[in-house]
């Protein structure tokens, strides 16, 4: 009976957190506050120590001691990793290198005459760019400046063009924050994990979506023509501008990615992601010193980099820390573990748990308009659950990671979706509805492919 009480309490806490976030309470505060309450309650109910080693004397002190330990661990580890990667991406945008890459990629599509095939081809190129421009919002802004005007000029409706931009959502690749976090939880080399598992599942999703795009948007355009509704007005007609930087700058955003991959295949070297990005910084600063006339302004670019790192601390790293507190509370409470133990002997228990955890993170991503927060909250629970089920951790973790980015793109409160909708002159909810069917198809493809490639 007590086990069912703990399961019910776990569900109750999850629902309460979801309701608070739906009411627009700050997610970081909600995770911190609920995490502290759950940690104390769980430790008192189950007798499980919050700090197994080095207790500070009582549950109250141990809870805040855990906060200290969590801050130290995440800032020194995954936090620094994400901040450095984001700082490099911010610098690439500042000097025009990532814009040059996006501009060049958009012009590669110019020769395709069939507009629906063009949409599909653009989606494939865009998802390749997502490996380098890891932020969905940043990629969306660049695409709005380069590709969106091309679509409109070719007679593609604003809502269709905007919807395809919203599909560029999957978080994958060795430089992505969620991927880096997943490799930490799974205790795997990030490049190995990407090449052997994540890339295969992501490729399955991307190819299925690319095949469906021409059929879906042709059908929706014809349907809209039979039942016309007010078409969105493009907020402003912008001329595509080619950034005034050398052509080879398109390769600068790729440097850390190339170094990380090369290190994986070259024996005798051991370069981590942070070091690869520092090498990219050094080479780029050298290029800027040679190219720019006003060399005295180059050192001030450090401010741009540090601001980018500070912004991602607020938006991502702080969520990792707060979500870790919430996750530890749920872990000590034991509801998910108890439920797993109950059904572990059932046929297909691993599939049931995978669907359950993936569904939870997917729904939280829709509610929050963020993929990072739910994944960082529920991802750390998977190693213990996977061990009980006798399956690899990635069997549970990978579909969750991909599902959160799909759920984020389905949310009308997602920052990237709001930016895209504003440029297209339509409401975010209308854009979310237009994109939702394809995103929903991505979800079962994600779970099926992740299970097949990790089991």
Image: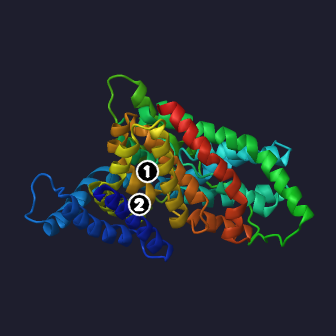
Picture disc at residue 316: 2
Q: How many residues crowd mark 1 within 10 Å: few (<14), some (14–19), many (20+)?
A: many
Provide the secondary structure element on which disc 1 rests.
helix
- Which circle marks residue 177 in the picture? 1
Q: Position of residue 385 (x, y in %)?
A: 36, 44
- Residue 356 location in percent, x, y? 48, 50
Residue at the farthest right position:
226
**Tags 2 and 1 touching, CB below 8 Å:** yes
Point out the tag, 2 or 1, that comes first from the N-terminus. Answer: 1
Q: Residue at x 62, y 51 (%)?
A: 168
Does 17 sit left or right of 118 as displayed?
A: left
Q: Is residue 225 left or right of residue 117?
A: right
**Residue sitting farthest toward the front:** 1
Residue 207 falls left or right of residue 61: right
Residue in the image at 42% along x and 50% along y: 85
Which residue occupies the foreground of this view, 334 or 320? 334
| Residue that appears at 53% across and 66% down | 367
């Amino acid at each position: 009976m007590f086990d069912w009480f703990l399961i019910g309490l776990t569900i109750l806490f999850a629902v309460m957190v979801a309701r608070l976030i739906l009411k627009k309470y700050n997610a970081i505060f909600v995770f911190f506050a609920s995490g502290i309450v759950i940690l104390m309650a769980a430790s008192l109910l189950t007798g499980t120590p919050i700090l197994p080693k080095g207790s500070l004397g009582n549950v109250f002190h141990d809870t805040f001691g855990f906060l200290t330990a969590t801050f130290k661990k995440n800032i020194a580890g995954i936090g620094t990793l994400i901040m450095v990667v984001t700082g490099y991406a911010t610098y690439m945008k500042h000097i025009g290198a990532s814009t040059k890459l996006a501009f060049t990629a958009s012009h590669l599509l110019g020769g395709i005459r069939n507009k629906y095939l063009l949409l599909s081809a653009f989606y494939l190129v865009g998802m390749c760019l997502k490996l380098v421009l890891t932020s969905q919002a940043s990629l969306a802004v660049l695409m709005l400046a380069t590709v969106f005007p091309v679509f409109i000029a070719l007679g593609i409706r604003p809502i269709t063009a905007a919807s395809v931009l919203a599909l560029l959502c999957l978080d994958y690749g060795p430089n992505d924050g969620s991927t880096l976090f997943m490799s930490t939880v799974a205790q795997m080399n990030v490049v190995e994990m990407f090449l052997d598992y994540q890339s295969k599942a992501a490729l399955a999703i991307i190819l299925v979506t690319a095949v469906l795009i021409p059929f879906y948007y042709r059908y929706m355009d014809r349907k809209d023509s039979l039942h016309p509704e007010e078409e969105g007005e493009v907020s402003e007609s912008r001329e595509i501008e080619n950034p005034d930087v050398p052509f080879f700058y398109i390769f600068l955003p790729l440097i850390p990615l190339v170094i990380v991959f090369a290190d994986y295949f070259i024996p005798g070297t051991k370069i981590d992601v942070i070091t690869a990005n520092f090498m990219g910084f050094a080479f780029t600063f050298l290029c800027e010193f040679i190219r720019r006339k006003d060399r005295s302004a180059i050192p001030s670019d450090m401010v741009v980099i540090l601001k980018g790192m500070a912004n991602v601390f607020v938006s991502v790293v702080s969520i990792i820390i707060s979500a870790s507190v919430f996750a530890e509370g749920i872990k000590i409470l034991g509801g998910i573990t108890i439920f797993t133990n109950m059904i572990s002997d059932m046929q297909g228990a691993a599939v049931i748990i995978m669907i359950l955890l993936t569904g939870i993170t997917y729904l939280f991503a829709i509610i929050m308009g963020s993929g990072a927060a739910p994944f960082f909250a529920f991802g750390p629970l998977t190693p213990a659950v996977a061990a009980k089920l006798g399956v690899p951790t990635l069997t549970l973790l990978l579909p969750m990671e991909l599902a959160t980015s799909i759920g984020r793109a389905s949310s009308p409160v997602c920052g990237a979706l709001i930016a895209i909708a504003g440029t297209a002159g339509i409401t975010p909810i209308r854009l979310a509805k237009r994109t939702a069917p394809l995103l929903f198809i991505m979800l079962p493809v994600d779970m099926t492919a992740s299970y097949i490639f990790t089991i």
